[in-house]
Image (cartoon, grey):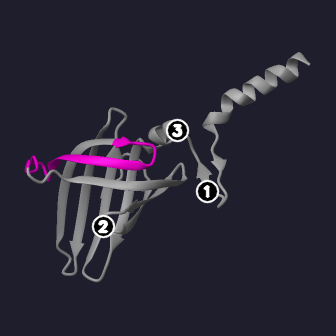
Amino acid sequence: MVSLVALSALLAACDSAVPVADASGMPRYSPEDVQELLQGTWLREYGGDSIEARRILVLSPDGSFAETVRITDAAGQVTTQNHAGTWLYDGTNLKRKYTRMNGKPPSRLNLPFATFEIQLESKNEFTGIDHVHLNRIRYRRVSPDTVP
């Protein structure tokens, strides 16, 4: 009986770290778990007829982020941009405030923000919806030495 009680207590203590599947079968994490899982290096790749882009986003535990973007146009010309700022997860949205745009401070009249309602697909992938610009993004976790 004592071992059964001890096992129950151990399972209850571990329960918050294990995601629970929602009705659609997607893992559901606590906001604290999501905040921790978002830390790391993420890759987003996208493109169209005239460009291809690779975006590396590093979300640091101290609330800062660094973002490197590599854009290749239809002629094969490559442009690289480096951005930085602060990030937070509010329980629903991943919010980023840019404090450096391509190495320079942005205009105080037009501070850039990016806000995406996110859903973790797994510990290594998340999707986001930008309700202002009506677009959907997908990031996947990559090793810290990944280049754009």
Q: Residue furthest right?
A: 1
The three-letter code of the residue at mark 2 reads His
- The residue identified by callout 3 is 33
Residues in magenta? 88-108
User: Of the residues under marks 2 and 1, which one precedes in the sequence?
Assistant: 1
User: Marks 2 and 1, how far apart in space?
Assistant: 25 Å
Q: Residue at x 51, y 51 (%)?
A: 124
Q: Residue at x 35, y 41 (%)?
A: 88
Q: Is residue 74 magenta?
A: no
User: Of the residues under marks 2 and 3, which one precedes in the sequence?
Assistant: 3
- How packed is label 3: few (under 14 Cα within 10 Å), some, or many (20 or more)? some
**The C terminus - image quarter:** bottom left
- Mark 3: secondary structure: helix
- The residue identified by callout 2 is 133
- Mark 2: secondary structure: loop
Q: Residue at x 18, y 60 (%)?
A: 80
- How packed is label 1: few (under 14 Cα within 10 Å), some, or many (20 or more)? some
Name the spot of residue 104 as percent of width and height, x first: 9, 48
User: Marks 3 and 1, how far apart in space?
Assistant: 15 Å
- The residue identified by callout 1 is 26
- Mark 1: secondary structure: loop
The three-letter code of the residue at mark 3 reads Asp
Residue 25 versus residue 105 in the image, above or below: below
